[in-house]
Amino acid sequence: MKEPKAVARVIFASWLVAGFVALGPTPLRAETDAGPTCVSCHDAAAASHAKGKHAKLGCATCHGGTPAHLANPGPETRPSKPDAGTCQACHVKDARRMNWEFADHAKAGLSCTDCHGNHAPKGAKGVDAAA
């Protein structure tokens, strides 16, 4: 008989995959991006992003919708900071990342970007880079 944690992982992974399959194309890839507008204030982040593996993705892909921030720029309307769930939306096929909630990294409060970087994802020492 499997351990309860192992069963929970299988159930969670199945639920996660089924959920993304049912969604069809992920809403995170929607063309709702304001990339050039973002660059006008966030040029350093944009320059770093342009050199990374995710250069073809726009700002809203990872930071979510930006209409309120575009209308009234400031900390109170700042788009969301990507978390492990943001990364998993595209990296769902990697079984190691599907079990994020059960991993020691998640228990320690770490997100993917804590080790792999934010705008130009890279590998961490001894860790494969996010693809």
Image (cartoon, grey):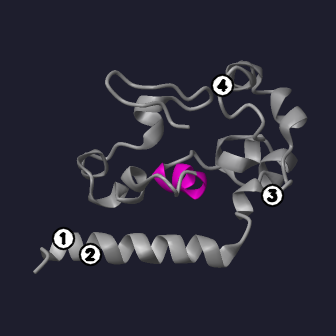
- For marks 4 and 2 on the same chain, the one whose residue lies earlier in the sequence: 2
Between disc 3 and disc 1, the foreground one is 1
Residue that carries the numbered disc 3 in the rendered image: 30
* Distance Cα–Cα, label 4 vs label 1: 36 Å
Amino acid found under the numbered disc labelled 4: Gly
On-image quarter of the C terminus = top right
Q: Looking at the image, which is closer to me, 84 or 131?
A: 131
Label 3 packing within 10 angstroms: few (<14), some (14-19), many (20+): some
> Can you tell which mark lies on residue 5?
1
Residue that carries the numbered disc 2 in the rendered image: 8
Amino acid found under the numbered disc labelled 2: Ala
Task: Tell me which segment is drawn in magenta.
Answer: 84-90
Amino acid found under the numbered disc labelled 3: Ala
Question: Which secondary structure, mark 1?
Answer: helix
Residue 9 figure quarter: bottom left
Residue that carries the numbered disc 4 in the rendered image: 52
Residue 68 figure quarter: bottom right
Label 4 packing within 10 angstroms: few (<14), some (14-19), many (20+): some
Q: Looking at the image, which is closer to me, 44 or 93?
A: 93
- For marks 3 and 4 on the same chain, the one whose residue lies earlier in the sequence: 3
- Tell me which secondary structure the magenta stretch mostly adopts: helix
> Can you tell which mark lies on residue 83?
none
Residue at 51% across, 36% down: 130
Q: Is 88 contained in the magenta span?
A: yes
Amino acid found under the numbered disc labelled 1: Lys
Q: Is 106 contained in the magenta span?
A: no
